[in-house]
Image: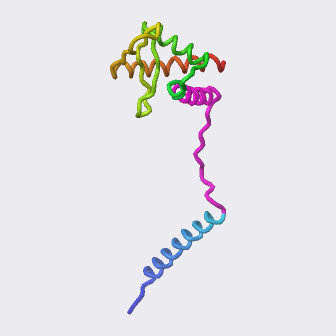
Amino acid sequence: MIITGYQVQHVLKTYSQQLSVRSRISREKIHGNNGQKDEVTLSSESKKRIMIDKITHAFVSQLAALPERNETAQQILKRLSQEYGQPLDVETDPGEVVSFKVVNETGEGVPERLSPAVNEHLRKRLYDITQSFVYEQVR
């Protein structure tokens, strides 16, 4: 069997490429991956908005769950009632969904439950009003 110089050079070239790949991999294992790392930097305004969003979510979920409402909750519910045009009360459905009912100002009679579409609109408005209220307090 005759081995030409070209074949020897080709084998040596392939061997040196494999060695360089192995040495590069071993260096990366030793020194760790020094490549660029993803980093997210939030501005102070973004951090503030995230905090306000968390507070708003917690407040809205507690608004319906608590039997007694503090002054802030009463103000927010009053603002929502004024927008709707009738006095509203909030309750939580079994599925942990906030729903609204129209109450009589005297407290007499059966509260009128609202349609799902109206409830969805009022939930969005409640969230918006609460968020703006919290934002005003944080300033």
Residue 14 percent coordinates (x, y) = 48, 74
State the image quarter where residue 53 is shown. Answer: top right
State the image quarter where residue 39 is shown. Answer: top right
The stretch drawn in magenta includes residue 58: yes
Residue 100 percent coordinates (x, y) = 42, 20
Q: Residue furthest front?
A: 108
Residue 44 percent coordinates (x, y) = 65, 28
The stretch drawn in magenta includes residue 1: no
Q: Residue at x 60, y 48 (%)?
A: 37
By secondary structure, the bulk of the magenta-drawn segment is best described as: helix
Point out the stretch of residues depicted in magenta. Answer: 31-60
State the image quarter where residue 76 is shown. Answer: top right
Closer to us: 68 or 75: 68
Q: Residue at x 51, y 15 (%)?
A: 77
Position above or below: 68 against 19: above
Residue 118 percent coordinates (x, y) = 36, 18
Left or right: where does residue 73 sit relative to residue 84? right
